[in-house]
Image (cartoon, rainbow, N blue to C red):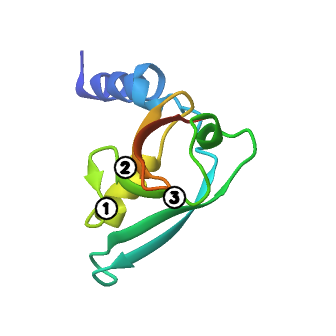
Amino acid sequence: MNKKMLLLSAAFYSLVVSPTTLAAEKGKMGLALDIAVEGGFFNPTLSSVKVKELVAGGAAEKAGVLVGDQILKIADCVIPGCPADDAKDLMKKNKGESVSFLIKQADGTELTKTVVAE
Protein backbone atom coordinates (compact mmCIF):
# COMPACT_ATOMS: atom_id res chain seq x y z
CA MET A 1 0.00 0.00 0.00
CA ASN A 2 1.49 3.35 -0.98
CA LYS A 3 1.68 6.42 1.27
CA LYS A 4 -1.23 8.23 -0.38
CA MET A 5 -3.51 5.21 -0.03
CA LEU A 6 -2.49 4.77 3.61
CA LEU A 7 -3.30 8.42 4.39
CA LEU A 8 -6.68 8.14 2.67
CA SER A 9 -7.46 4.98 4.62
CA ALA A 10 -6.56 6.68 7.91
CA ALA A 11 -8.69 9.71 7.04
CA PHE A 12 -11.65 7.49 6.11
CA TYR A 13 -11.32 5.59 9.38
CA SER A 14 -11.28 8.77 11.46
CA LEU A 15 -14.31 10.16 9.63
CA VAL A 16 -16.46 7.05 9.37
CA VAL A 17 -15.41 4.45 11.90
CA SER A 18 -13.99 6.36 14.85
CA PRO A 19 -16.43 6.56 17.78
CA THR A 20 -15.27 10.10 18.57
CA THR A 21 -17.00 11.34 15.44
CA LEU A 22 -20.39 10.18 16.64
CA ALA A 23 -22.12 13.24 18.06
CA ALA A 24 -23.75 12.51 21.38
CA GLU A 25 -26.79 14.54 22.24
CA LYS A 26 -26.04 17.14 24.90
CA GLY A 27 -27.95 16.65 28.11
CA LYS A 28 -29.60 19.19 30.34
CA MET A 29 -29.47 19.24 34.13
CA GLY A 30 -32.57 21.41 34.53
CA LEU A 31 -31.22 23.92 37.02
CA ALA A 32 -29.84 27.44 37.21
CA LEU A 33 -27.12 28.21 39.74
CA ASP A 34 -26.05 31.26 41.68
CA ILE A 35 -22.25 31.02 41.61
CA ALA A 36 -19.66 33.06 43.50
CA VAL A 37 -16.01 32.83 42.45
CA GLU A 38 -12.68 34.03 43.75
CA GLY A 39 -9.13 33.91 42.49
CA GLY A 40 -9.33 36.30 39.58
CA PHE A 41 -9.83 36.04 35.86
CA PHE A 42 -7.10 33.51 35.01
CA ASN A 43 -7.64 31.01 37.83
CA PRO A 44 -11.16 31.33 39.24
CA THR A 45 -12.35 28.89 41.88
CA LEU A 46 -15.87 28.43 43.15
CA SER A 47 -16.43 29.91 46.59
CA SER A 48 -20.15 29.07 46.76
CA VAL A 49 -22.86 27.55 44.57
CA LYS A 50 -26.59 27.71 45.28
CA VAL A 51 -29.53 26.40 43.29
CA LYS A 52 -31.34 29.48 42.04
CA GLU A 53 -34.00 27.92 39.81
CA LEU A 54 -35.25 24.53 38.64
CA VAL A 55 -36.88 23.54 35.38
CA ALA A 56 -40.28 22.10 36.25
CA GLY A 57 -40.12 18.35 35.69
CA GLY A 58 -36.42 18.59 34.77
CA ALA A 59 -33.59 16.27 35.71
CA ALA A 60 -32.53 18.09 38.91
CA GLU A 61 -36.09 18.33 40.20
CA LYS A 62 -36.61 14.61 39.52
CA ALA A 63 -33.45 13.89 41.55
CA GLY A 64 -34.85 15.80 44.53
CA VAL A 65 -32.75 18.96 44.26
CA LEU A 66 -34.52 22.02 45.73
CA VAL A 67 -34.26 25.75 45.07
CA GLY A 68 -31.99 27.17 47.77
CA ASP A 69 -29.87 24.02 48.12
CA GLN A 70 -26.19 24.81 48.56
CA ILE A 71 -23.89 22.61 46.48
CA LEU A 72 -20.87 21.49 48.51
CA LYS A 73 -19.41 19.09 45.90
CA ILE A 74 -19.80 18.44 42.21
CA ALA A 75 -18.63 14.83 41.77
CA ASP A 76 -15.39 14.89 43.84
CA CYS A 77 -14.70 18.61 43.37
CA VAL A 78 -15.17 20.33 46.76
CA ILE A 79 -16.70 23.80 47.02
CA PRO A 80 -15.20 26.16 48.07
CA GLY A 81 -12.01 25.57 46.13
CA CYS A 82 -13.21 23.72 43.04
CA PRO A 83 -11.64 25.28 39.91
CA ALA A 84 -14.40 26.86 37.81
CA ASP A 85 -13.21 25.11 34.64
CA ASP A 86 -13.31 21.71 36.39
CA ALA A 87 -16.83 22.34 37.66
CA LYS A 88 -17.95 23.38 34.18
CA ASP A 89 -16.50 20.20 32.67
CA LEU A 90 -18.10 18.03 35.36
CA MET A 91 -21.50 19.55 34.58
CA LYS A 92 -21.25 18.95 30.82
CA LYS A 93 -23.04 15.67 30.31
CA ASN A 94 -24.65 13.91 27.40
CA LYS A 95 -28.18 12.58 27.71
CA GLY A 96 -28.23 9.64 30.09
CA GLU A 97 -24.95 10.55 31.83
CA SER A 98 -25.06 11.54 35.47
CA VAL A 99 -23.30 13.75 37.97
CA SER A 100 -23.49 13.58 41.76
CA PHE A 101 -23.88 16.59 44.00
CA LEU A 102 -23.33 16.83 47.73
CA ILE A 103 -25.92 19.38 48.79
CA LYS A 104 -26.78 21.14 52.01
CA GLN A 105 -30.47 21.86 52.38
CA ALA A 106 -31.95 24.87 54.17
CA ASP A 107 -32.38 22.85 57.38
CA GLY A 108 -28.67 21.90 57.37
CA THR A 109 -29.19 18.33 56.15
CA GLU A 110 -26.42 17.16 53.80
CA LEU A 111 -27.45 14.72 51.06
CA THR A 112 -25.96 13.29 47.89
CA LYS A 113 -28.18 13.70 44.85
CA THR A 114 -27.43 12.15 41.47
CA VAL A 115 -28.80 14.02 38.47
CA VAL A 116 -29.15 12.17 35.16
CA ALA A 117 -28.96 14.55 32.19
CA GLU A 118 -32.01 14.62 29.96
What is the crowding at mark 2: few (fewer than 14 residues within 10 Å), some, or many (at least 20)? many
Numbered tag placed on residue 74 in the rendering: 2
The type of residue carrying mark 3 is Ala
Residue 29 appears left or right of 72: right
Measured in 3D between alpha carbons, the distance from the residue under mark 2 to the one under mark 3, in whole angstroms, is 18 Å
From the viewer's perspective, is residue 81 above or below residue 93? below
Q: Amino acid at mark 2?
A: Ile
Q: Residues within 10 Å of mark 3 (few under 14, many from 20)?
A: few
Q: CA distance from mark 3 to mark 1?
A: 17 Å
Mark 1 crowdedness (10 Å alpha carbons): few <14, some 14-19, many ≥20: many
Instruction: Return the disc, 2 or 3, that comes first in the chain's sequence.
Output: 2
Image side of residue 40 versus residue 99, left or right:
left
Which of the numbered marks, if any, corresponds to residue 79? 1
Mark 1–mark 2 contact, CB under 8 Å? yes
- Residue closer to the observer: 81 or 43: 81
- Give percent across and percent down for residue 84: 35, 65
Q: CA distance from mark 1 to mark 2?
A: 8 Å
Q: 48 above or below 76?
A: below
Residue 19: percent from left, percent from top: 42, 24
Please give the name of the residue rendered at 59% of the width and 42% of the height, measured from the top-left corner: 60
Give the percent coordinates (x, y) of residue 18: 40, 24
Q: Residue at x 31, y 61 (%)?
A: 79
Q: Please name the residue that numbered disc 3 is placed on.
A: 106
Percent of width and height locating residue 115: 51, 37
User: Three-letter amino acid code at disc 1?
Assistant: Ile
